[in-house]
Image (cartoon, grey):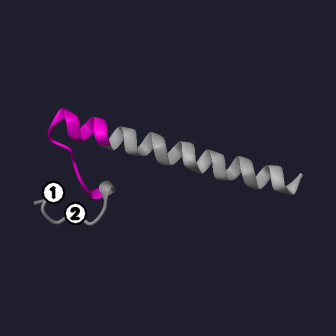
Amino acid sequence: MTNSLAFSPTDVMPLVPWAKIAMALQSLISLAILGLVVARAVNILT
């Protein structure tokens, strides 16, 4: 039921290993992009 009604990745529980790896990779990429944006914002302010 959780998987069929999910609206975002936070609502989904991956059941197969490749899905867990894909979601972990997506999280790492988004964290890296967020880090780059914050670093750029700090660089502009200084």
Q: Contact, CB < 8 Å: mark 1 with mark 2?
A: yes
User: Which of the 4 image quarters holds residue 41?
Assistant: bottom right
Left or right placement of residue 24 versus residue 33 in this view: left
Left or right placement of residue 29 versus residue 14 in this view: right
Numbered range of the magenta stretch: 11-22
Residue at the spot 15% in from the left edge and 37% down from the top edge:
16
Q: Residues within 10 Å of mark 1 (few under 14, many from 20)?
A: few
Disc marking residue 19: none
Amino acid type, mark 2: Ala
Q: Residues within 10 Å of mark 2 (few under 14, many from 20)?
A: few
Whole-percent x and y of residue 40? Answer: 73, 51
Q: Which residue is mark 2?
A: 6
Residue that protrudes farthest toward the right in the picture:
46
Q: Secondary structure at mark 2?
A: loop
Residue at the spot 21% in from the left edge and 35% down from the top edge:
18
Whole-percent x and y of residue 21? Answer: 29, 35
- As for residue 17 lying within the magenta part, the answer is yes
Residue that protrudes farthest toward the left in the picture:
1
Answer above or below: position of 32 versus 46.
above
- As for residue 25 lying within the magenta part, the answer is no
Q: Which residue is mark 1?
A: 3
Disc 1/disc 2 C-alpha distance (Å): 5 Å
Residue at the spot 55% in from the left edge and 42% down from the top edge:
32
Amino acid type, mark 1: Asn
Q: Secondary structure at mark 1?
A: loop
Residue at the spot 86% in from the left edge and 56% down from the top edge:
45
Left or right placement of residue 46 versus residue 32 in this view: right
